[in-house]
Image (tube, helix red, strand yellow):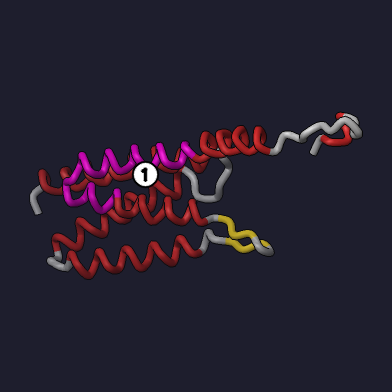
Amino acid sequence: MPIDDQLAIVGRLAFAAALGAFIGLERELRGYPAGVRTVALVALGSALFTDVGQLLSEENRVAAGIVTGIGFLGAGVILREGYTVRGITTAATIWSAAAVGMAVARELYLVAGLGAVLMFILLEARPVVRRLDDLVRGRLREPIAHEDQEGPQNDR
């Protein structure tokens, strides 16, 4: 394979890793287990597998293998604590980062870049949505002071 083609692959791998790091930034800042390095590695690895699959004319098998393998990796970050399930968003982030890496390897740079930006926006939207939800529920749950009850006892 000519060196120019190999350099193009290296460029795609770097771009996939950069997008993965961007996506993983939100997870890292919030202290979740899969942060910048993990998500960057997922995107980079998916891009590398996709590029190699193209060279071997095994694109469909490689794509199916990536989706399956990333599914197992994502399942590893999901934890159940009593009735609470944690890690689903992190698992979805890992799975989606793999798709971004695959898109980069297929030279779908705009799709990969916008996909990464949308993922970051969705991950960042959660705290905003929670604050809005608390605000709305807080207004709806304000205790109603009755004449026969005093204020502080009504606070919940």
Side of 128 relative to 51 (left or right): right
Q: Is residue 14 visible?
A: no
Whole-percent x and y of residue 43? 34, 50
Quadrant containing the C terminus is: top right
Instruction: Identify the residue at image location x=17%, y=68%.
Output: 58
Prevailing secondary structure of the magenta residues: helix
Instruction: Identify the residue at image location x=37%, y=44%.
Output: 20
Which of the two residues, 113 or 150, is positioned nearer the viewer here? 150
Whole-percent x and y of residue 92? 43, 54
Whole-percent x and y of residue 113? 27, 39
Instruction: Identify the residue at image location x=36%, y=50%.
Output: 97
From this view, report whether residue 139 is shown above or below residue 17. above
From this view, report whether residue 66 is shown above or below residue 100. below
Q: Is residue 118 magenta?
A: yes
Quadrant containing the N terminus is: bottom left
Side of 15 relative to 95 (left or right): left
Q: Which residue is mark 1?
A: 20
Instruction: Identify the residue at image location x=21%, y=39%.
Output: 110
Q: Amino acid at mark 1?
A: Gly
Task: Count residues near mark 1 (Cα–Cα under 10 Å), then give few for <14, some for 14-19, many for 20+.
Answer: many
Which of the two residues, 14 or 34, is positioned nearer the viewer here? 34
Side of 4 relative to 148 (left or right): left
Q: Which residues are magenta?
A: 100-125
